[in-house]
Amino acid sequence: MKPFQFLLLAAALLATANAPAAAQTKPSPAKTGPAPEPPIYASPEGVWVVLSGSALNSDKPTGRLVGARIFRADAGSNAYKEVGQIKEAATLAEFQAVAGPGAIQSLKQEHKLASDEAAWAFIQAHPNVRDYGLQSLDMPFRQALGTAFLDASAKAAKAGTRFAYRVQPIYATAELNRQTEGKFFEKTVEMGRLSPLPRPRLAQVRGLDSVVTVRWAARAQPGSAPLTTVYGRVWRQGPGERGFTALPARLLATRERDSLIFSLDDQVRPESLFRYYVQPLDFVGNPGPGSDTTYVLSVDPRRTPLLHGVASHDTTAGIALTWPALPAKGYWAGIEIQRSRDARGSYVRLDTIAASATGYLDTRLLPNIAYHYRLRALLLDGRAPDVASASATAAHKPTGTRPPLAPVAVTGEPGGRNVRLRWQPATPDLNHDAYFVYRGTARQDSMVVISPALPGNTLTFLDTTAANGRRQYSYVVRAVNKNNQASPFSEPVAVQPHRAMPVAAPLGLSGYADGAALRLSWDDATRRDAAVVAYHLYRRPATAGATGKSGFQRLTENAVRGASYTDEGRPGEAWQYAVAAVDALGTESAWSPVATVRVPAAPLTPPSRVNARPVPTGVELSWTHPAVAVPKGYALYRRARQEPQPQRLATLTPTQTRYVDQTAKPGTLYIYSLSALGAAQESARTPEIAARR
């Protein structure tokens, strides 16, 4: 996905795992409210433990937490047994075995990597799940990365079986492990339960010749929900099939305001009836309640044969309508006949007859009244082909006059958002009564009346209902005399209104930092809207409290071609981006959701050239600032020669380069070291230096 607006709905997953939670001792009394639920979830594949947002590896620690041991017991029992540990894959082959054969290939395509070895090097250099975009939603991928654990042995348990789990964190230092000994996460889960996700409802359905489009909408969940909707599994039943079959690809849910949207584009056999429903899935794969079944016919109404050549005959038995037979297709449901006594509209349904019929006799008539008819071919799913209507007029009375001639010199041109038509009469006609303007496709038998009766010398008409600025409309004009006799259609004229149309917006935007380069990509809206030709990319600094479009600036003067862009940043910077699609007329779509991309800060290094010497008031320490600026200051550590571990003696400001240890006792040898302090991290300490007061 390129909207992904990065939606995304996995925000709860990332929020759960991006910062390792502190271990808890059971029982643990609440301090200011209920404790957060431990990230342990039952799923169809077993039980998942999601503990970290970065790979856990004791050889390459990225934080204090470097691993975790997982224990399981039957609910109500205290007989816990270890079932495994959270750890990252040690080799490329092991990674592929856990994450699946397509994981490396997807990673190579997403980041344009030349080989499997290059992909493995990328994984080694990027332990955080935030660097993998949508791929981080795949739980086997997270397991191989070393941020989650799957107890697959629980999969075989019967539905309703309850297990108790304990998770013992493993920290980077022996001191931390000693302090947290006997402390753990604990949670009881039940296997086989339906996930309490919102039920999707049908929002839109459309069938074309070989493509079926279905959209479902569900209520969006609050960010505090422990399990969040991420995917949808679609079930389909085709013609001649006895039951439903799950489609192989899962749908990624997107968020639009307060709703979750599941969008399906399915390649199917033309001229067939299909049934669909969707089940929402949470991020560990548990299904929720399924939607109602919807029926879709794979027929494009714009390409179906239209009813044409409708003729009317005033007979002694009534008005007889005739037309050529529709092609023999299985998707026809019937023919709807509408009638009106006003050519401008007010049609009502008169009857619905078989699709194979080629004629109809209307006997429900009043004498000496002109009637107008319109016929529509109906499809099995209730739709009617677009502008597949025909008009016929008959007066239930004899007449000896001749019909008028068709108007001439018909012209049309866009008039702002509307269409202005002009014409001339063929010859002067004292029996002239009115003109009627028709609009439709290029075929005259699809024309329908769009104007009221235009009396007298009215030779112009403004069409304000031509709503589609991307469509070329065909117009004809017809004259009617006082005997209700209509002329033939005039020569047609084609006009396209200058009316801006809504442009399909990109559904998502994602990005990642590649050194100082910020790689951005988004959903290609041209796949859903052929009028999209380029994109406008917007950027603002990622500051707290920024909302809406405030602070955004166009990133490039010219529109961006294609669905990706590379921006430049500096270490420690964070930017927010949004993208909008643009059509050929320059109309801009709605913006995608905002995506935040951060360039990692330069590594924090300790001070250099540390010196220590005795002075009358104690031991004086002095040092030189490191090459990278220190954000928060320095930490000074001290130990006596017989002490194995140093203790922090003082926290110093970023500007200090000197400190006097006045607590040093005379004659005692002390060993000092110094580290730099960042916003949320501490550098390694300098080599130790000794001094005696």
Image (spheres, rainbow, N blue to C red):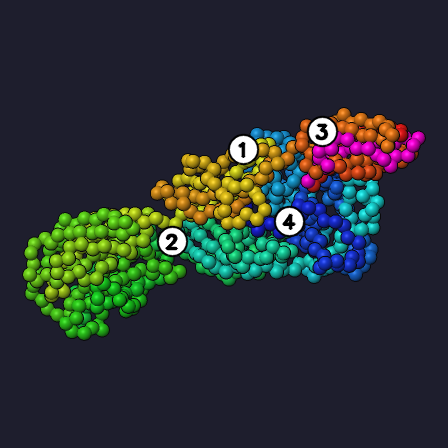
x 77%, y 59%: residue: 29
Frontmost of labels 3 and 2 is: 3
- List the single residue furthest toward the front: 616
Helix, strand, or loop for circle 4?
A: helix
Rendering coords of residue 598 (x, y %)? 59, 39
Q: Is residue 297 left or right of residue 486?
A: right
Residue type at the position of mark 2:
Val
Query: Is 539 drawn above or below residue 611 in the view shown?
Result: below
Judge depth for marks 3 and 4 and give the one in front.
3
Pointer 3 residue: 625
User: Which residue type carries mark 1?
Assistant: Glu
CA gap, disc 4 to disc 1?
Answer: 27 Å
Side (left or right) of 480 relative to 414 = left
Label 1, label 3: how many angstroms apart (C-alpha)?
28 Å
**Is residue 152 at all visible to an observer of this figure?**
no
* Nearest to the observer: residue 343 or residue 335: 343
Q: CA distance from mark 4 to mark 2?
A: 44 Å
- Mark 3 and mark 2 lie on one chain; the one further toward the N terminus is 2
* Whether residue 571 is visible: yes
Q: Residue at label 1? A: 568
| Closest to the observer, 112 or 593 | 593
Which structural element holds mark 2?
Answer: loop
Residue 204, position as x, y percentages in the image: 44, 57
**Which one is earlier in the sequence, the residue at label 3 or at label 4?**
4
The residue positioned 70% from the left and 56% from the top of the image is 37
The residue to which callout 4 is attached is 15
Can you give x and y, in whole percent of width and height, for residue 267 in the image?
45, 48
The residue shown at (33%, 56%) is: 385
Q: Nearer the viewer, mark 4 or mark 1?
A: 1
